[in-house]
Image: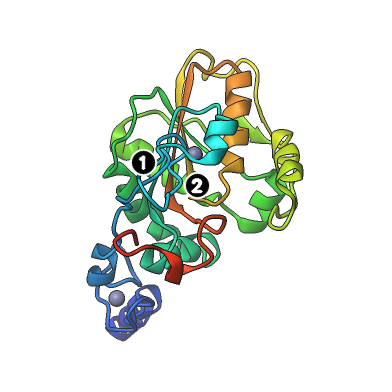
Amino acid sequence: MFRILANRILDLLFPETCPSCNGPSQAHRTAPFCNTCWAGIQPYEGPMCRVCGLPLPSSYADRCAECTADPPEYETHRSFGLYDGTLREAIHRLKYGKLRRLAPPLADLLFAMDIPDVDYIVPVPLHPSRLKQREFNQAGLVARHLSRRTGIPLDLLSLEKVTNTPPQVGLPRRQRLANERKAFRVLEGGPLKGRRVLLVDDVATTGATLRACARALAAGGTALVEAVTLARSTPDVWSGRKTIPEGVA
Ligand SMILES: [Zn+2]
Ligand SMILES: [Zn+2]
């Protein structure tokens, strides 16, 4: 009786069908994703902007147009991979499917990157009302595990989201930037003053959120800001997967 119940619970916790390939999955650490699909999550190694990490169609230019015209207040932003396939599905299940157990294996992807030399790890915060609605901050969970792996202290309190910005998709760039600019602030008297900070988020699309956080951190007196994200979504550059040049994806 106990064994039947235990198996039922295990089946509930670890479904046997991998959402990426629909094949059977016995992997526990990355459940419900199978080992083969998880191992297929590849780092992006194509040409990119050397400041913001935006994938570029060719390696001819080393900076994107935005970083040339309006450099961000962080040093560099790098993403592990493109927001596609198993990586996209896994982030989605962590964020909206509340599969918190995916945070450690996702954080391991960041750990595999060249993590800059910093004093604190700071996740991009959610507004308190959004946090209440979602129950947890997915960036915070990933940052916590990255902090454990690297031994770099985590600061969850200093950077705050003060305005609950509506979804920014579809707004003109200038308005989006103006909204984001007021969205974050650093608490006075915290530990970040004069320190080097690594900002962590799950997905970057326009990069406006990271720019706004970096601006707030700089205004709060940090010495230097670096940024890493799990995945980079590129809607402004490429209209879809079919247009990604061969060898890039
Ligand atoms: Zn699979
Ligand atoms: Zn750039």
Looking at the rendered structure, the kind of residue marked 1 is Leu
Q: Position of residue 6 (x, y in %)?
A: 32, 78
Label 1 within 8 A of ligand 2 by Cβ: no
Query: What residue sits right under mark 1 in the picture?
Result: 146
> How many numbered badges does the structure rendering display?
2
Q: Residue 174 carries which label?
A: none
Mark closest to the chain's N terminus, 1 or 2: 2
Looking at the image, residue 190 sits to the left or right of residue 111; the answer is: right
Query: What residue sits right under mark 2 in the picture?
Result: 139
Q: Please give the name of the residue rendered at 27% of the width and 77% of the height, measured from the top-left corner.
A: 25
Nearer to me, 65 or 81: 65
Looking at the image, residue 27 sits to the left or right of residue 128; the answer is: left
Looking at the image, residue 122 sits to the left or right of residue 161; the answer is: left
Q: Please give the name of the residue rendered at 55% of the width and 64% of the height, measured from the top-left corner.
A: 96
Nearer to me, 94 or 202: 202
- Residue 133 shows in this picture: yes
Q: Where is residue 172 in the image (x, y as percent from the top left)?
A: 74, 50
Q: Please give the name of the residue rendered at 28% of the width and 70% of the height, measured from the top-left corner.
A: 37
Please tell me how crowded label 2 is: few (under 14), some (14-19), or many (20+) other residues with Cα within 10 Å: many
- Residue found at the very far front of the displayed protein: 60
Q: How is the image coloured?
A: rainbow
Q: From the viewer's perspective, is residue 124 above or below residue 232?
A: above
- Residue found at the very far top of the displayed protein: 194
Looking at the rendered structure, the kind of residue marked 2 is Ala
